[in-house]
Image (cartoon, rainbow, N blue to C red):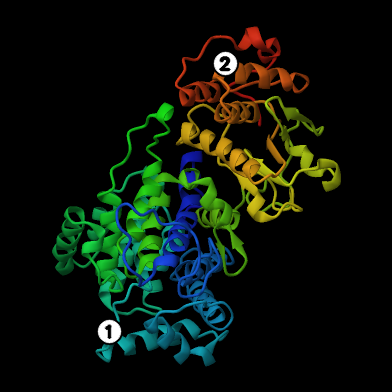
């Protein structure tokens, strides 16, 4: 029985990261699929092309099929994926994708789906698909491809508190197209790894997943995992096979060192997500699939807040899905499609801070092309707002700033509570770099949070740092510019500004802005 929701902001962040990081890995690997393997000195980029050809940042069938599963899971009231209603929804979604959205498709998946196309939208479509996949495997044809492992991430999120139920569901959804037990085994292992990572922020679930397999296959899987941990990803070249695909992904994760945090030098532990995804692409051959598999687990471990802003900006794909949608789907699945008390992530209009209902905006003191403000600015006429891009540091509604193109509305996972940010330095730095990147393109940028009092000034000060302004001057000037809006800075976020600059944090907040004492900085309701 699935529990209705998970508990912490960190866990929400990690659930949100599963589909997002998988899609980013997919889009990162697309240009290099079945081409000459990249060397260690070459950095993969989301440049598009590939077998599609794909647009820059566009993901392929790996994420398309994962989205099919995700959409089915948020469109049902059933308590278990094993319920035939959910299985039918997933199977029917696959068939819809096959005829309307498939930009690429694996041979094994194509064989199964094409054979049951006439059963689309019938009460027995899942049974027909399971039967066809089983017949294919029993025929002796190759049936252990990586096509079910690449899409399995959403399954892991549906019942985060029950390992055995998740394992059963992982195998069953795999068997819709891949009936070979090895494909099911791989999905069980990876789903347990993702489930465990979302709950506990470790990679320990990979080995725990092996314990959920039939006893007679556990030793072999431990051996395969041992090989992955001692060899580089490219030493598993036949990664169209599910075992070597998993080995290449696990190798990319385990053999990529986790950086030691050094914010002043721009080095963050969260960079492990990016570095390991790049290593997965360098494995070569089926690059998008290996990187998508890798990304699902990396996202579960490090969260959406660890995904680089420039990847989030351009990742997209069928059916008109963006980074924001991928984040929302991950959270909705893990919460059994129940929004939080404010309606996030599905509400059209996010509730405004009751202490900041009036739109407020002021020019950044060091760059008048950056506007600092609050969420009520979303209520203004676009002509009155006068910006080309928005960087949101708080939750927003699906229709807030709807006139801004999706690629120019960046939403950074930054929380205005102490210890609530899994990667506070990294996330604050990413917010500033998003503003900087948009400004380099000549865009006029709105930087805002809910009230414009805490996250906004700290991100603005970090942006000043990127312009060469020292941290103390930046914080002082930004707070003075925001004076009429009564800035009430979270002192942990303020410390991040100084840490990123490699400077000691002075005790100057009350001296610089006396009104900070009017509000408790640890309970500001942004």
Q: CA distance from mark 1 to mark 2?
A: 63 Å
Residue position marked by numbered label 1 in the rendering: 142
Left or right for 136, reference 430: left
Residue 252, quarter of the rendered image:
bottom left
Q: Nearer the viewer, residue 23 or 330?
A: 23
Left or right for 424, reference 162: right
Can you see residue 198?
yes
Query: Would you place residue 423 above or below residue 117 in this image?
Result: above
Residue located at (36% from left, 66% from top):
287
Residue located at (68% from left, 36% from top):
448
Percent x, y of residue 125: 50, 85
Left or right for 347, reference 84: right
> How many numbered callouts?
2
Q: Nearer the viewer, residue 105 or 73?
A: 105
Q: Nearer the viewer, residue 4 or 489?
A: 489
Secondary structure at numbered mark 2: helix
Q: Earlier in the sequence, mark 1 or mark 2?
A: 1
Residue located at (55% from left, 41% from top):
413
Residue position marked by numbered label 2 in the rendering: 472
């Amino acid at each position: 029985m699935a529990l209705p929701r998970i508990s912490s902001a960190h866990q929400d962040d990690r659930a949100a990261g599963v589909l997002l990081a998988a899609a980013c890995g997919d889009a990162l690997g697309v240009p290099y699929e079945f081409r000459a393997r990249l060397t260690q000195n070459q950095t993969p980029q989301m440049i598009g092309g590939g077998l599609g050809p794909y647009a820059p940042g566009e993901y392929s069938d790996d994420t398309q099929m994962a989205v099919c599963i995700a959409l089915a899971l948020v469109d049902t009231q059933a308590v278990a994926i094993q319920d035939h209603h959910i299985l039918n929804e997933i199977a029917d979604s696959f068939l819809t994708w096959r005829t309307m959205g498939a930009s690429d498709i694996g041979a094994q998946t194509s064989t199964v789906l094409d054979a049951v196309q006439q059963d689309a939208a019938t009460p027995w479509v899942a049974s027909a698909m399971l039967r066809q996949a089983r017949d294919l495997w029993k025929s002796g044809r190759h049936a252990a491809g990586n096509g079910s492992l690449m899409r399995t991430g959403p399954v892991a999120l549906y019942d985060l508190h029950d390992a055995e139920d998740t394992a059963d569901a992982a195998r069953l959804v795999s068997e819709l197209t891949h009936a070979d037990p090895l494909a099911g085994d791989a999905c069980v292992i990876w789903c347990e790894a993702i489930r465990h990572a979302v709950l506990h922020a470790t990679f320990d679930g990979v080995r725990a997943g092996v314990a959920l397999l039939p006893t007679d296959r556990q030793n072999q899987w431990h051996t395969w995992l041992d090989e992955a941990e001692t060899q580089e990803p490219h030493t598993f070249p036949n990664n169209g096979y599910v075992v070597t695909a998993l080995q290449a992904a696990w190798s990319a994760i385990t053999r990529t060192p986790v950086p030691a945090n050094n914010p002043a030098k721009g080095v963050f532990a969260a960079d492990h997500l990016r570095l390991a995804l790049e290593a997965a692409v360098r494995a070569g051959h089926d690059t998008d699939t290996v990187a998508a598999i890798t990304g699902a687990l990396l996202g579960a471990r490090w969260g959406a807040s660890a995904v680089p802003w420039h990847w989030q900006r351009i990742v997209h794909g069928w059916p008109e899905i963006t980074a924001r949608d991928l984040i929302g789907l991950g959270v909705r699945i893990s919460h059994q499609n129940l929004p939080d008390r404010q309606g996030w992530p599905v509400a059209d209009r996010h509730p405004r801070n009751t202490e900041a209902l009036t739109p407020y905006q002021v020019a950044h003191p060091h760059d008048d092309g950056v506007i600092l403000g609050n969420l009520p600015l979303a209520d203004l006429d676009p002509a009155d707002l006068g910006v080309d891009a928005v960087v949101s540091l708080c939750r927003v509604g699906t229709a807030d700033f709807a006139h801004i193109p999706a690629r120019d509305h960046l939403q950074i996972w930054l929380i205005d509570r102490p210890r609530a940010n899994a990667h506070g330095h990294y996330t604050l730095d990413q917010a500033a770099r998003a503003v900087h990147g948009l400004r380099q393109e000549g865009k006029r940028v709105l930087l805002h949070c809910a009230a414009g009092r805490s996250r906004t000034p700290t991100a603005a000060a970090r942006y000043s740092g990127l312009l060469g302004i020292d941290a103390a001057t930046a914080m002082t000037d930004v707070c003075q510019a925001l004076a009429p809006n009564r800035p009430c800075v979270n002192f942990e976020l303020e410390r991040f500004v100084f840490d990123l600059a490699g400077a000691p944090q002075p005790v100057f907040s009350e001296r610089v802005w006396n009104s900070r004492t009017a509000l408790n900085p640890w309970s500001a309701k942004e």
